[in-house]
Image (spheres, rainbow, N blue to C red):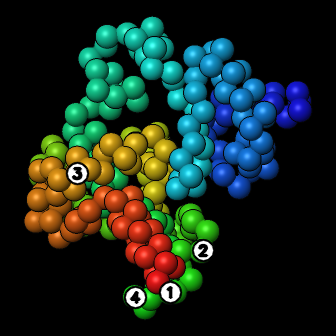
Amino acid sequence: MEHELKTLTSRLLAHRWLPRSDRLVRRALVDETFRVELEHRLAAVGLQFQDNPYADHVAVALLPDMLEPVFGARREYAASNAGLTRDEIALLVVIWAIIILPKRERQVTRRELADDGQGDMFGADKPVAHGEAVSGALAEASLIADFGPLLGGRTKVKNFMLGKLARLGFIERRNGMLHEGPLLDVALDYRVVADRIIHGTLADVLTRAGHAVPETNAFEEAEVLSDAGDEEEDA
């Protein structure tokens, strides 16, 4: 186990994120003893293991009490330890809302992009899907047309901001389309951000741009579905 712990710790430090399908990552997710020791070793250098069961990757991040010693009080880190400006954070949140909100709704209700809308009586028994089976793509041109003028101009968004988000691992740019990057669903906390978007001003902004957001938090919907299932079982 010692060699595997060293290997996984080193790879996480070197690559920042790893796919959930990785052999050692899978062990960290199912072997409690292995996970505890991994977290202990990461904590010794001021890091924590980032795992979201709905995300396709795991990652490492600084412990909260290490943010100030590492980044200090520099202006660009006041709101983001990735060095993002306010406009870049706004763009990231917009992309997250358009890609991750619908994705989480599909995952919680066990539906996929290819779903034709028909009901599946065994849907609740399916494992949670990851990757492009549930994560849609966003047309880069559409995003720039809708939000470019609000975020410093279309040229800035296309040539600088999207490139920075891609380098940081939040998105992937392929043939004019924006896809979910390794960190998009790991670095942003769905339970916190989703409610603020759905019930906040951004919902109106997205809707006006033609990107409707769900009416409810996907986890609240999951609880309703679960209750309905229990009622049917009792009947």
> Which residue position holds label 2?
126
Q: Which mark is residue 117?
A: 4
Q: Which mark is residue 153?
A: none
Tell me the CA gap for discs 2 and 3.
28 Å
| Tag in front: 2 or 4 | 2
Label 3: state its secondary structure.
Answer: helix
Tell me the CA gap for discs 4 and 1.
9 Å
Confirm or deny contact between disc 2 and disc 4 (CB under 8 A): no
Label 4: state its secondary structure.
Answer: loop
198 vs 97, nearest the viewer:
198
Q: Which mark is residue 120?
A: 1
Corner quadrant of residue 45: top right
Confirm or deny contact between disc 2 and disc 1 (CB under 8 A): yes
Q: Residues within 10 Å of mark 1 (few under 14, many from 20)?
A: few
Q: Residue at x 34, y 28 (%)?
A: 80
Amino acid type of disc 3? Ile
Q: Earlier in the sequence, mark 2 or mark 3?
A: 2
Asked if one can make out residue 109 in the rendered structure from this viewpoint, the answer is no
222 lies left or right of 197: right
> Which residue position holds label 3?
197
Tell me the CA gap for discs 2 and 1.
10 Å
Amino acid type of disc 2? Lys
Q: Residue at x 11, y 50 (%)?
A: 201
